[in-house]
Structures are given as C-alpha cells and as structure tokens.
Amino acid sequence: MSCFLLSFWRANLLLCLGLFLQYGEARVLTEAQAGPLYRVVGYPLFISCNVSGFANADAKQEFEYRITKPANPNIEINIISTTDQTFGYAMYSQRVRKKEITLTNMSSTSVIFKIDSLQKSDEGEFDCTAINSEDRFDGTYSAKTTVKVIDNSLSVSSPASASLSYNEGDALTLTCQASSNTVQHTHLSLAWYLHKDSEDEAQPIISVNRDFTLSPGRGFEERYQAGLIRLDKIGEATYKLKMAQLELSDQGRIYCQAQEWIQDPDRSWYSIVQKAAEKSTLTVKAREVVPDTSSLVVRILAQPTTLQEGQELSLSCTIDAQNLREKFFSVAWLKESVELARIGPSGIVSVGPEYSVRAKEGELRAARTGDRDYRLILQPVRTEDQGEYICRAWPQERGPDGAFTQGAAQDSSPQIVSISATESGFSLRMDEHDVSVNEGDRLKLTCQVHGVKSQLSVTWQHKATSSSTAVFTNVISLSQEGVMDTAAEFMSRKVKATRPTIANFTLELDEVTPSDSGVYQCTVSEWKINSKTNSQSQTAAVTVTPADVFLKVSLISRNNMVTVGGNLELMCRVKGPRVPITVTWSLQRGSSPDNVLTMYSDGTISWSGDQRRYQLKVDSTQNQVVYYLLINGASHSEAGSYLCSVSAILENAYKRLPPSNQVAVNVLNPVSELTLTCPPTMTSNINTNMQIKCQILNPSASSRYAVTWHLQQKAENKTIISSNRDALITFEHVEPSQRQRINMKRSEGPSFELNIGQAQMSDRGTYICEVVEWLQDPRGDWIQLSTVSKSTTLTVIEPGDVKVVPECKSGTFIGIIVAIVIGALLVIIILMLKLCQSKGGKKSEESLWAEQHPLNTKPNEAD
C-alpha cells in the first residue's frame, strides 16, 4: 500500500512539473512605440502597437487604447477599440465618431493609433491593450507610451513684399527668419518653394535638412551645380536665398517653409511641426520687348504744398500718351527714391515696405480716378513727410498669354512739400539713443512725451540695420484705449508695450538674441475724436552682445596624471553673467568624442552608458561657476582628452557656446615590486624525480600571476609549460607521452614548482621561470604590470660517472664524497658487530651468505 501511495504522489508531482514547464514561460508579447514622445498642439500623433505569441499567429487580433492623465494617474480613460464602437468615454467619443481619432489595423497583429489634431489635454500615458483571444492568459497583453504635448514655438517669416517684379537675368535675394524656442533638443530644416501657376504642387528650389545638408530641388540641379542658386545660413535664424540669373520659368508664388524635428527614444527623427511664411508673387519679365516711351508725359500735383502736422496731403499723377485708352501703365509715387505706393496695369495697389504700416492704419490710400489720373492721399501727415515727391510711370505691353512686359520708366518733375509742426506743444524724446544688452537679457526702451493734451497711441518698430534702404517692421503697438497688438513675428516672444505713467511709453523684450540688434523706433500719435492729428517718432540703436562673447568656458586640472585606482579632478570654469546653462563633459579616446555626463540647467544629471564612476560637484561665485568632474577609482578606460561644452538657454532655446580647451588625462599602471628567487644550479641522477622551485618574495594580495617555464638547450629556447593568471595550465613543446612526467603546481608563498619525473639525460639545460604580474583595475579589467624571470641550470648524471666539478664548486663536491664514505664505513661496522654477536650465541638456523639468499638485480619500483 505504501509503495502504491508513493507511486501516486510521484506521478502527480511529475504532472505538475510538466504543466509548470509548459506554461512557465510567457508567449504573448505586446509592444508599443517607446516614449516619451514630444508632440505639438494642433499636429497629429501616431503610436504603433503590435502583439506576437498567440497560438494562432494568422488570426486577426483586436486592440484597445486608454489614457492615464498626469492629474489623475490612478484613473484610466477609454479612448477607442477595434471591436466596440461605444468603447470610448464621453470626452473622446465625439472625436472618435468624427474620425479625428482612429485605430487602424496595419496587419493582423499590429495597429496604428492616430490623433489628427493634438490638444493639450491629450498629454498622458497611452495604454495599448491586445484583447486575449485564447482560453488562457500567457504573457504581456498591454504596453504603455508616454506623450508630452508642447506648444508650437516655431516662428517663420519673410520680409519680402507681396509682389516681386524682376527682369529676366536679374539676381534675386530673399531672406527668411526661422527659429524655435522649444525647450527640448530639436533640429530645424528649411526649404524655399516655388509654386508655378501651371503646376498643382509647389516644388522646392533648394533646401537644407536637419543635419545642415544642402539639396537642390527638381529642375534646379544644374543651376545649383553652376553656383547660380545658393542658400546661406546667417546667424542663428536667418536663411538667405540667392538666385543669380532669373529665368522666365521662375515665375510663380515663392515662399520659405521650416520644419522642426525631434529625436524619439528609438533614435528616429520625427517632424513635430512645420510652418510656411507668407507667399510672394514673383514676376519675371523678358528683356527683349521695350515699348516706345517717347510720347509718354508724366505730371505731379500736390495739394496743398504747405501744411501742418495732422492735415491731409493729396498727390495727383496725370499721364499723357498717344492712344492712351489702348495702352496699359503702372504708376508709382516716390519720396526721395523711396516708393510709397504703386498701381499696376490691372489696377492692383501695392504699398512700399516703409509705408505698409501706415497703409494698414489707414494713413495712406491710393487709387486710379480716371483713364489718365491717379491719386495718393496721406493723412495725417508728419513732419518727416516733407520733402521732394515725383510720379513715375511705366508702359506695359500685354502678351498673348496675358502677361505684362514692363517698358522704360518716365518720371515727372519734382514737387516740394513743406510740413510744419503744430502749436500744441506735443513733443517726444527717447531716453537713450545707443543701448547695449547681453544676449538672453531683457531690452527695455522708454519714450517720454511732453505737452500731452489728448489721447495718445504708440507703435514700436524695428529694422535690422541703420541703412536708409532697410525697412522698419512692427513689433508691438498700444492703442489710445490701451489695447495691445503684437506683430505676428513676435507673437511667440515675451514682449509687451506699457504706459507706466501719463508721459512714458515703454517697450520690454525678454531674452533678446543677436538678431534683435538694430534700430528701434517709437512713434507716438495724437488723437482727437477718433482721428489722428499728429505723430512723432524717435529712434534708438540697440546692440545685442552674443552669449559666446561674454560667456567664457575653460577647462583646467591640477594634476592630469593618475595611477590606476586613484582619483582625479577636472574643473570647467564658466565666466560671465548668470544665465541657465547645460554643461556636457565628453571624452575623446579616438577620432570622435563620447559624452560622459550632462548636467542640465535644472540641476539634474544624466550619464551616458555605464559612466557612473564619474561624479560632479558645483562651486558658484559671483562672476563664475566651476563644475568639477570627479573620477573616483580611475582605470585606463578613463584616459583620453576631456573637454566641457556649455549650452545657454536663451529665448527658451539652447545656444551652444564654443567648447573649452582639451585636457589630456593619463592613467598609469602601478609600479610593480615583483621579485623572484630560484636555485641557480641543480644536479640530479638519471631516473630520479626533480623539482625546481620559483618563489615570489614580495607577493601582493590583490595580484595574480601568470607563469611560463622555458628550456634553453644550446642555441634553442623553447616553452615547456605555462599557467595563466586563472591557473589554467597549457603544455607547449612537450610530447603527449611526456606530459605525465613533466608538470607544474603552485604552493604557498606563492611558489611555482616545475616537477620532472624520472629525469633523463635529455632534460639537461637551463630552465627559465618567467612570471607576469596582473592587477585588476576598479572596472574589473585586468592589466599587465611587469615581467620578471629567473633561471636554473640542471645537470643530469649517471651513477659512477666522474664529473669534473668546476673549481668554484669543488668544496661542495668533496663534502658529499666524504659523507658517502663515512656512511659506508658505519654500515660495515654495524654488520660486523652483528656477525660476531651471532657466533657467540645460539647457532642460527639460516645462513646469511649470498648463495642462499641471492640479491634482486632490479629494485622494486613500488619501493
């Protein structure tokens, strides 16, 4: 019965063990795209998810998506399912019904989750769950991806006018400003596009990708290779397009477009946002057609020619030509070579860059009032509006395709206009006319008004240079009712216009960059009953000093040589104003440097790979911050050239400064004190066992030793046997039949013994004991220190051989002979005493003669 129970339990135990082995290893695995993923509000989000390991690999699997938001980390919110149309909670169900959120099967075991337009509330941890389609659970059925939703910080603008007109063969130069203040590390790519009227899609002219590689667009390759098309990056955010010789085929709408890229955790680059500047219409005219202009007459009339600030100025242009009604003309008004406005052959009005703001505010208006008459009105006029005005007209020839070809210009006689200041006593002045500020600091400008008697508004403008051809663009304005209006280019910037007192207007622009240098203009206007009566302007020149000028980075070391296991300290000094910075330490061992660790502006530290041996400390003073890189327990892996790189956070973006100088660090091996002792000579009879001992006199407890025995016979030197640092023995020039006779062992000391059994005449020679000392560094790697060797000369003789002993060893040899003789005499005396004693007593029954007890001719090997 007991045997039966034992067999029963044993069978059940084996069954349970089999089930455990069958189901112990998980087969199902669900994987989602690794996070965190940084994506932008208003742009799409894609997350891939797949599952593997189901028993039926070809069966279609179903998936569900949920989200956990940072505000409620313990609550999961259903979003969408591939099987249940009512799966999503209310906050997501409407977007799912509108197909704004989708979950699409890419294969039977994978899906793509997509949100067409991200909202800030979509930030959180997304959970992809594969619905179990089998009768048991075996593995991982869900995977999570963290998504961070950030605001759009990409700014793209081009100061080009809405209409560009050039002749065939002319050179075109356009600039584009593109920048981002995204906190995360991103790259920008930029391309200039031309959208021809005859094509459905715009084609790139030239582009620079996120790795700063230039590529020409289709159809522009030959001109790019010939150097006729260029794209230059100037400073941090300016991209300049240059087309040396325009062609007729270049007509169309031209614009620049930037993309911002971020590197996801899987190391792939993803475009998080793209934005295009306003398009300009580019017209390229043929040079061959030049209409006859000899009969064209242009006149100008100003009414009145003398007026006060705030009044209305009317400038009329009249043109006379033969067959006037059958011809087309363009007419423009110019003040001292600066174009105010132009009316094209089809009646479209375009305003010059310097007057675009006034046209937007209704101060400038232009229109065609008859077949030959054109009129421009300025109201209210300013004192700076006085000067010399002309009208300019161009004949226009209309071709079969409807395009116009411009002829030679004809100017009117000049008209002088005088404008005097009003008697209101209203005056304006700028506190400072030359202002310097460091990159990353705040720019503050103040305009003071004197003689205020009515409501005032202010407009702040900026132009990059003080050149007369440069154009002012709006920054921000403050209306007479106190309403602030920021220009599109500065919408993403920290800028504000205030009126802290009745007489002061201030402009504040935070985190300035070098591109903010230039001339700033403050224009204050006086209003009465919703009508502008007077305006005055003042300017100030602003210089923004780049961060790499006032922030200096240097690297020093008190001692750049260290022994393995020792400690080392490097100091990275950052001198200059206190701005948020990120410091990265790198080590160059070969052709390119590897990052060691990074300390971010918020104080967090990240290590690259297995670099935890490096530590960091910071010492801050008023004018500098010193970052100490501590190397505790150095190994040869820490040897190389170190440098520190600094990125300053300016305008919510990182700006990399020139790196520090390099400091070379040498890691030296410890000095070994290895000493050996071996007997210089040994003599052995043939067929006897020999032992040659090689002993270390000053061993180190942390060291290991590799030992090799060499045999030198005449001119030949061969390796017999060796033992590595892990005591693994290897035979070299020893026949397999001899390996039982020759071996090596280690004993206390340590000492290393070479054993030779049944010595033969062929064993004679000089035996060299070679010892290599190994030490383990703090990383666990073994390093070789010194190699020391000692030799022993072995002589093998046959019994009875007369050996000629060297003179220096004759005393030893004589001592041995004397000892042998004395021993033989003692044996003979003892035998004689026993013989005599036996004769005097009882007669022995056995004889001791050799005839009766013959001696063995060969000694027993066991003895």
Image (cartoon, helix red, strand yellow):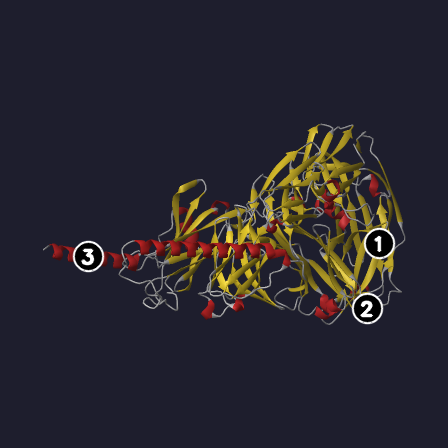
- Going by the numbered disc 1, the residue's amino acid type is Cys
Residue 207 placement, left or right of 686: right
Q: Mark number for residue 287? A: 2
User: Which-is-in-front pick, marks 1 and 3?
Assistant: 3
> In which quadrant of the rendered image does the N terminus lie?
bottom left
Q: Residue at x 89, y 65 (%)?
A: 294
Kind of element beneath mark 2:
loop
> In which quadrant of the rendered image does the C terminus lie?
bottom left
Kind of element beneath mark 3:
helix
Residue 65 placement, left or right of 156: left
Dot 2 and dot 1 residues touching (CB under 8 Å): no
Q: Earlier in the sequence, mark 2 or mark 1?
A: 2
Residue 250 placement, left or right of 149: right
Q: Residue at x 49, y 70 (%)?
A: 735
- Going by the numbered disc 2, the residue's amino acid type is Arg
Query: Residue 455: x, y in percent?
Result: 71, 31
Q: What's the distance in space between the residues labelled 1 and 3, CA to CA?
A: 112 Å
Which residue lies under the disc numbered 1?
Answer: 391
Q: Mark number for residue 711? A: none
Q: Name the quadrant containing residue 406.
A: bottom right
Kind of element beneath mark 1:
strand
User: Which-is-in-front pick, marks 2 and 1?
Assistant: 2
Is residue 588 visible to us here?
yes
Which residue lies under the disc numbered 3?
Answer: 10
Q: Name the quadrant containing residue 98.
A: bottom left
- Residue at the far bottom: name it: 400
Q: Earlier in the sequence, mark 3 or mark 2?
A: 3
Q: Residues within 10 Å of mark 3 (few under 14, many from 20)?
A: few
